[in-house]
Amino acid sequence: MAQTRRTFLGAVGGGCLAGGISLRLPHPGAGGGADLPELVALVQRTPRAELLARAVQLHAGGVHWRELLAAAFLAGIHDVQPRPVGFKFHCVLMTASAFAIADALPERERLAVALFNLDDFKNSQAQDVEAGDWTLPPAPDIGADVDAAKAAAALVAAMTERDPAAADRAVTTLARVATLDQAFEPLWWFGARDFTNVGHHPIFVAQAYRTLQQIGWQHAEPVLRSLVWGLLAAKAGADDAAFVANQERAAALRLADDGKPSARATGDVLRDLHTKDADGAAAMVAALLHDGLALDAVLDGLRLMAIEQLWRQPGVLAVHALTSLNALRFAAGTAQAEHTRAMALLQAASWQVQYRDFLGRGANYDREAPGLDAIAVADGASTPASVFATARAARRDTAPQALLCARAGTAGLLAAMRHWLVRKVGEHHDYKFAEALAEEIAAAAPDTAARMFAGSVGYLRRPSDPDHAAWKLVADQH
C-alpha cells in the first residue's frame, strides 16, 4: 500500500504516541511502586555483583520491572559519558528497544529485560570510571527568560554553531517549559546531521524520545542535556558532508501521501545503492519520490540494503545500517517540519552508501556473495523452531529455510527471536537490533520482510547460546 503520513506514524511508533507522552510507569505508591530518583541512586551505588539479586528482591516487594528499567536508563544518563555516542553508552542507547521487547513478552519474562539493562549499566559505569569517571554536571543557570519558542531558536543557533554551553542552556530551558514534541523538533534535525561513529546520533535521539514516553517528561532535563552533549561530539567536515549536500534537496522535497507502489522499484533502489555514492543515493531517492513513487517502495530498498550489509559482514558494526535506518525513519514519521522529515529520509539513503563503503574497507566484507534478492526458497517444510535450531555459522545454508518460513508469516519467527533473546542475550546490540528488525519487518512488504529475516538469522540468539545471568535469576522465581 502507498505510504501515507498516518500509516507511517503508526508503523514507526512501536506503540508510542508521536504527539505526546504515553506514560507507562506504574504510579508510585500504587501496588508498591518506587520513588524513581531513590531507585536510581540505589542502582548507582550498589556493586554490580549485588545489584541483580537486590533488584529481584525489590521486584518481589512491589517495584515494577518498568521502574527498574527506567532506573537503569537514568543512571546511565547521569553516570556514563555520552561522548562518543556508542560504545559504553549503549546502556542508554537500547532502553526504548528493551521496553518494546519486554512489552511483547509474556509477563513472567519481562523482569529479565530490566535485569539485563541494570547489569549492562553497571558494566558501562565501570568502564566510565576507568575512563575518568564522568558525571552529568549541574544544570546551567537559565535566567528568567524561559520562553519555549525563544529557547528552541537558541538551541538551533547553538547546535548550528556547535556551541555546547549555549546548547546546554537552551535545552535545559526547553526541558522545563516545552512539551516533548516542542523540545525534540530541532533535535530530529541535528540528530540526522553527523555520521560520526557509524550513525549513533539519530539512534540516541529516537531512543531518548521513546524512553521519555515510557518514563515521563518530568525526567527530561538530564536526558536532553546528555543528548545535546553527545550530539555535539562530532565535527563539521567529513561527518556532516552528506547532510550539507542534502539540505537543498530536503527544502524542496514534498512527501506525498498518494505515491505509487512498485515492487520493481524496490529492486531498482537496492541495485542502484550498490554503485552510487552518498550524494547520488540521496539524489535518486529525491527524484523517485518527486516522480510519485510510494515511500514504501523506497524504504524497502533501503531496508534490504541495510540487511545486506549484515549478510556480507556479520557482526556488531554492520547492525548499525539497520538500527540507524530505523531511527531515521522514526524521525521522519515524528518530526513536524516537512524539511526535517525529508532530511531524515535523504540521510537514510546517503548513510546506506556510507555503511557500504565503511564496511567494505574491512577484510571480512564479502563483496562477491549474491545479495538478499538471490536467496532461494528451500523445499519442504520449515518452522521457527527448526530455523533457530540451526548453527549461527551456517547462516548462508539456513537462509533458504528461514525465507521459506518467513514467507508463511514472520510473527512466529519474531516471537521466537524475542524468546531466545531474553534468555540468551550476549550484549546490548542484541536488543537494539532485534527491535529495529521487528519494526522494519512490520512496515515492509511481505517479500521484503521475509528476505530481511532470512538475511538476519545468522546474527540472532540461538537455543545453543548460554543463558544470561539475568534469565537464570528470573527462571529461579518460577
Image (cartoon, rainbow, N blue to C red):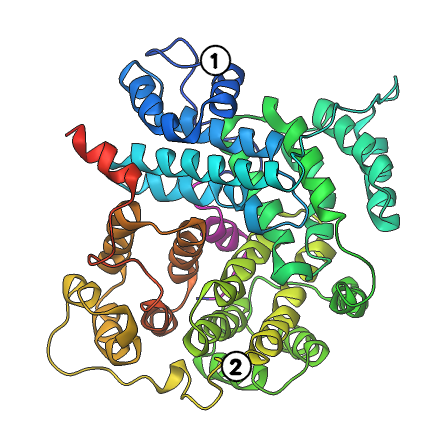
- What amino acid type is highlighted by mark number 2? Ala
- View extreme (top): residue: 29
Which of 151/52 is in front? 52
User: Considering the image in quadrants, where does the C terminus appear?
Assistant: top left
Residue for badge 1: 35
Asked if one can make out residue 163 in the rendered structure from this viewpoint, the answer is yes
Q: Secondary structure at mark 2?
A: loop
Residue for badge 2: 363
Real-space CA distance between mark 2 and mark 1, rounded to the nearest whole angstrom: 50 Å
Q: Position of residue 163 (x, y in %)?
A: 86, 43
- Name the N-terminal-most of marks 2 and 1: 1
Which of 337/309 is in front? 309
- View extreme (bottom): residue: 368
Count how many numbered circles sit on residues in the image. 2
Image quadrant in which you'd find residue 413: bottom left
Whether 52 is among the magenta residues is no
Q: Position of residue 385 (x, y in %)?
A: 15, 61
Residue bounds of the magenta highlight: 2-15
Asked if one can make out residue 344 in the rendered structure from this viewpoint, the answer is no
Residue 423 is left or right of residue 358, and the answer is left
Label 2 vs label 1, nearer the camera: 2
Q: Position of residue 340 (x, y in %)?
A: 71, 54
User: Considering the image in quadrants, where does the N terminus appear?
Assistant: bottom left
Residue 310 is left or right of residue 20, and the answer is left
- View extreme (front): residue: 130
Q: Residues within 10 Å of mark 1 (few under 14, many from 20)?
A: some
Whether 11 is among the magenta residues is yes
The image shows residue 264, relative to residue 220, as above or below, that is: below
The image shows residue 250, relative to residue 144, as above or below, that is: below
